[in-house]
Image (cartoon, rainbow, N blue to C red):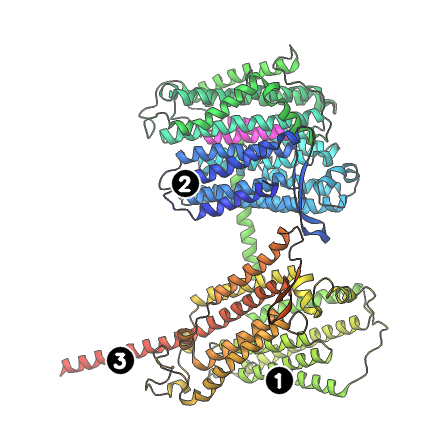
Amino acid sequence: MSLALLVLVPFLGSVLAMFMPSYARNREATLAGLVALGCAIHLGMQFPQLADGNVLREEYLWLPTLGVNLVFRLDGFAWLFGMLVTGIGTLVVLYARYYLSASDPVPRFFSFFLAFMGSMMGVVLSGNLVQMVLFWELTSLFSFLLIGYWHHRKDARRGARMALTVTGAGGLCLFAGVLLLGRIAGSYELDAVLAAGAQIKAHALYPAALVLILLGAFTKSAQFPFHFWLPRAMAAPTPISAYLHSATMVKLGVFLLARLWPALAGTEQWFWLVGGAGAITLLLGAFVAMFQNDLKGLLAYSTISHLGLITLLLGMNSPMAAVAAVFHIMNHATFKASLFMAAGIIDHETGTRDIRKLSGLARLMPITGLLAIIASASMAGVPLLNGFLSKEMFFAETVFLQSTPWVDRALPVLATVAGLFSVAYSARFVFDVFFGPSCIGAVPKPPHEPPHWMRVPVELLVLACLVVGVAPEWSVGPLLAAAAAPVVGGELPEYSLAVWHGFNLPLAMSFVALVGGALLYLVQRRQRAIGRLTRTPVLHRFDGQRVFEHLLARASEAGRRSRRLLATQRLQTQLLLMVCVALAGAGASLWFAPATAGDRSPLPFSPMFAMTWVIGCICAIGAAWQAKFHRLASLMLASGAGLTCCLTFIWFSAPDLALTQLVVEAVTTVLILLGLRWLPMRSKFVVQSARERILPWGRRGRDLLIAIAAGCGMAALAWLVMTRNFPNSISPFFLDRALTEGGGTNVVNVMLVDFRGFDTFGEITVLGIVALTVYALLRRFRPAPESMALPPQQLAQSDDGSSDVFNPRLAKDTAVGYLMVPAVLVRLLLPLAVLVSVYFFMRGHNAPGGGFVAGLVMSVALLLQYIVSGTEWVEEHLRIYPRRWIAVGLLLALATGAGAIVLHYPFLTTHTAHVTLPVLGELHIPSALFFDTGVFALVLGSTMLILTSLAHQSVRSHRWSEEQEQRLAEARAALSGNSSEDH
């Protein structure tokens, strides 16, 4: 299995899980478990290659000219995180199988879960910083879906929104920081950035890049002042909390700090920003955790505190501290995941997580109680457990840190106080929940042990805490060395994982923390017994959620005010504002940097060309003059202006543009004709005063002046540009390579489907989205009642069964009456138009044409059938399915581009094959043919979907007329019945 598959397989599993039935919990869990376990096994098999400091790397060309390729990179540190993501993910899947109820939408759970796992693996294995940010934002998106899984609950929706807002905004800052970092290092490749540490730290942009990257890391790992979102995310199901908040999402911030440690650490800015945030978070989270009454709330704040510990270690600018940070990442993942699962078991079997209602569970749930006690002891730093070892290393680093004198004195005290707090909240988790009188009758459900397999993940994690705590060098020594070496730059400092280091100051700090924490817990317990300490002292006044929601409300209010100030429902006013802003921007630019004409000699004057443009200008002015009251005449004149543009393209030897413009003019004319049908009619009985008649002329005069200024400005800008020489023109590049590298002599088409194929792919994607959006909007659109009446021409037709006006689906033919000649002509024209469309398509690579023009020609031919024969009659006899054409076109274009990636070439790289066939002989078949086929299909489907959606409004008008006649008939019948009763 390649590294790319480690990212791709979870996403494929997510798609499969989405389509599985909701009652198949076992199959869903089996699928998710096999995906996670398979990835974990494959990762585990790579360790022998990584143990000596080797790096596995895979690269797929994507945007090589921009230095952005798909790079997957696996070193010891990425291996460690990958094992946490997949290994703990496997255990969470097993746990979730028994935690979720039969009424929960299980397919959605495992689909989101696997997609999140794939996003995490994408971040961990990314060897390109831009690629890392992409997967980083995907983790924010899928964590939003997981936290809001129980979307019927208000707290879940609010917690998910808060998490997405904070981490998503941090991701945008991270993206900006990554762009600066890539600019400084000269590459976005992770290897190049890590090797350019000295260059980065000496650059003037280093502070800005550092702050932006730290914003991304701090928001993700819930560091002060962005810590408030994590406790609100506890509204998620406990399996999600155990996964996101022990091994994956909240670890991404510290993962990023450790990943970029060789490139960014070692400066004063790094020490104060990273170390300061970590120290505050460590103390704040531990303090607040002591006063939580919800089991998951206690674990959430303890997670914040431990993440602050890791951040503080990474901020110390010490290689030994970085090794301790990596070690605590491993240990925290094991004991915190087991504690979250134990809290979920308690909630699942008792019906509550309120510590005030729970007690005596050690007798009712002895095995679960023992497991939770061991994990809590590890969290508190009790000897012979893994948490003790990494906390001892932390204490040692605070003691031996060499910084300013006050920091040297304060940091060991802060570390000891934080350790004391952690013992206190761990003791509360143990003694308040598992000891004391029985809670039967005080909790919603009688407590009992969970199913055995639901407890197995907790047992395995607690076993890991014990094994690492008793035999650290044997169990995790090689793993820690392989994982920490890339973080510190390759050369590990000397350290020991021995359980006993003798009597020293770090051991004394541990003793003080254990004894002091126990005493603090006893004091707090006595205070709670008399009704005190019901909330967090002092800090309860500072509610991060309230501040966050207040800022959101302020931002929303500011948006509403600006909308009321600037926005308007009138399109004319919006266009006026846009044009005025554009004029102001252009005028300011020319004021500060005046433009002058170049010395390029103009072409000889052509009276014929000038006359063509005079006619075009007359048509444009006439269209604007007639647009208010004579819409059809205005449309005809606008078409004349468009035809002038077509002739201009031909005049300047641009037949592709002329052909495209001509067909677009035809389609646009039909579109506007369909839309004109539903515009409100001009009132014939409006009486206006003299002032009301004069005011519009003033507004039109203002608009005329602005239009003249904008038009003359664009003309002047075009003149200034075209009178200059272009020494660095890109035209020779395409002219020289169109045939040799693109396989075609039509340079314009080769550019569209090969050199700039990615742009074309984006454009057709947008076109498809627009078509589907128009279709969705028009399905709900209801024209104004005054526009629903049938035109007089249709009302004049007799309902003799021969016309499609009254019974389109039952009419034998529409080639009758006044539509006989047009109907016969358009039907004869259809096969000819199809032939012309195929002709344009086939010749597009070497002559004017291509998929876009061919799709529009085919659309015009089909639209003529609709115009003459009627919407319902055509759809009864000719099924088109525009949405399927859009889907096929987009998938075909995507498959063409993906095929190049499979062959290890950049996306949409063209390959040419020469095939010899009987009769036809040798055929030249470029892969761009299939891409152009996708363009053809999507353009055809999008055009037909938009225009037929508008055409369906006419069908509604017929139905409306029928309903009106039926209501009128019923009213007449009711009146006649009343009259007969009166008589």
Q: Is residue 162 visible?
A: no
Magenta range is 284-311
Identify the mark nearer the N-term, 1 or 2.
Answer: 2
Task: Identify the residue at image location x=72%, y=72%.
Answer: 714
Question: How many other residues sit within 10 Å of disc 2, few (<14), some (14-19) or many (≥20)?
Answer: some
Q: Quadrant of the C terminus?
A: bottom left
Residue nearest the viewer, comparing 883 with 55: 55
Identify the mark nearer the N-term, 1 or 3.
Answer: 1
Q: Which residue is mark 3?
A: 969
Which numbered tag is attached to residue 622?
1
Which numbered tag is attached to residue 11?
none
Q: Quadrant of the N terminus?
A: top right
Real-space Cα distance between discs 1 and 2? 69 Å
Residue 301 belongs to magenta span: yes
Real-space Cα distance between discs 2 and 3? 60 Å
Q: Mark 3 and mark 2 in contact (Cβ < 8 Å)? A: no
Element under disc 1: helix
Above or below residue 552? Residue 463 is above
Q: Percent x, y for residue 895?
A: 57, 57
Q: Disc 2 marks which amino acid?
A: Arg
Q: Disc 3 marks which amino acid?
A: Ala
Q: Disc 1 marks which amino acid?
A: Gly
